């Protein structure tokens, strides 16, 4: 299993595919590299696909902290590129990964050829704070199982519940694998996020996508990103909720391919 040491911590990553261009995928909040499984076979046909687990995720080492700052997660990813000898990437950030990607593009612009922000936030507003509080209350009252139940309406569309609910038992099991302490540390970084005042500093070609049924990172946030980043474009996916890597993987891949070809 590929690990590397960054800031005296073990960071887990995977790289696969035969393309000449590297596509770097940034995980959502409770995701690990495994969560891209519905998309990687298609992406590997065109790209060398690089995934990593951020601190607090998957197989990467965790260290004690009040929270994991988004800029630190971005710098860890940049350090990984240096170690792998990769000069620049097409960068795709999903949800939490989209927030990290904003910081990455600001702090390491020379390493980003194109930026795709999916189902993510320009800033953590008061609604997002209340959602985080409700997840914490659910964890205290009923553990991971209740927290999973509370999160479902925020993550998926009505179409998903009607057609793909058979996936839920496996998703419940996977969700329970991530410790609440790690999730708290990651959420703590999210609650500090507000890129509105510096989005206009980003100077990389940017595309924003969001599902029209995304309740967790709603379309108004996508519009803030599109309006704030010079030249950014926006696509709203009909009938999709927040977790588009699970309920709309083909549409997500198509957005990546089309943006890469522009």
Image (spheres, rainbow, N blue to C red):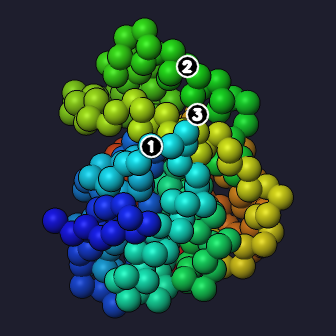
Within 10 Å of the Cα at label 2, are there few (<14), some (14-19), or many (20+) other Cα atoms? some
In this view, 1 is above or below 78: above
**Label 3 or label 2, whichever comes before in sequence order:** 2
Q: Quadrant of residue 235?
A: bottom right
Q: In the structure shown, which secondary structural element does the residue marked by tag 2 occupy?
A: helix
Looking at the picture, tell me which residue is in the foreground, 101 or 206: 101
CB under 8 Å between callouts 3 and 2? no
Q: Distance between the residues labelled 3 and 2?
A: 15 Å
**Label 2 or label 1, whichever comes before in sequence order:** 1
- For disc 3, the marked residue is 215
> Total of numbered circles in the picture?
3
Left or right side of 219 for 216: left
**Which of the two marks, 3 or 2, is nearer to us in this view?**
2
Q: In the structure shown, which secondary structural element does the residue marked by tag 3 occupy?
A: loop
Q: How far apart are marks 2 and 1 (CA)?
A: 24 Å
In this view, 262 is above or below 26: below
- For disc 1, the marked residue is 64
Looking at the picture, tell me which residue is in the foreground, 158 or 110: 110
Residue 159 in view: no
Q: In the structure shown, which secondary structural element does the residue marked by tag 1 occupy?
A: loop
x%, y% of residue 44? 26, 74
Residue extending furthest toward the right:
197
- For disc 2, the marked residue is 134
Left or right side of 63 for 121: right
In this view, 90 is above or below 131: below
Looking at the picture, tell me which residue is in the foreground, 221 or 163: 221
């Amino acid at each position: 299993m590929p690990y590397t040491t960054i800031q005296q911590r073990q960071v887990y990553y995977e790289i696969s595919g035969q393309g000449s261009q590297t596509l770097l995928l940034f995980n959502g909040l409770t995701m690990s590299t495994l969560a891209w499984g519905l998309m990687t076979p298609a992406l590997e046909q065109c790209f060398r696909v690089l995934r990593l687990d951020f601190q607090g995720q998957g197989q990467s080492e965790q260290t004690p902290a009040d929270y994991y700052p988004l800029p630190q997660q971005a710098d860890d990813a940049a350090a990984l590129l240096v170690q792998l000898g990769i000069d620049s990437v097409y960068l795709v950030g999903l949800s939490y990964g989209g927030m990290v990607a904003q910081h990455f593009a600001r702090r390491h612009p020379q390493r980003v050829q194109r930026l795709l922000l999916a189902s993510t936030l320009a800033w953590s507003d008061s609604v997002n704070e209340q959602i985080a509080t409700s997840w914490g209350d659910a964890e205290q009252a009923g553990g991971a199982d209740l927290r999973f139940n509370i999160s479902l309406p925020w993550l998926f569309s009505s179409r998903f519940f009607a057609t793909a609910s058979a996936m839920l038992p496996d998703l419940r099991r996977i969700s329970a694998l991530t410790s609440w302490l790690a999730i708290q540390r990651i959420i703590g970084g999210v609650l500090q996020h507000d890129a509105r005042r510096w989005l206009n500093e980003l100077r990389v070609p940017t595309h924003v996508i969001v599902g029209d049924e995304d309740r967790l990172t709603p379309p108004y946030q996508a519009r803030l990103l599109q309006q704030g980043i010079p030249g950014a474009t926006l696509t709203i996916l009909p009938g999709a909720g927040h977790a588009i890597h699970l309920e709309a993987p083909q549409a997500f891949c198509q957005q990546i391919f089309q943006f890469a070809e522009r």
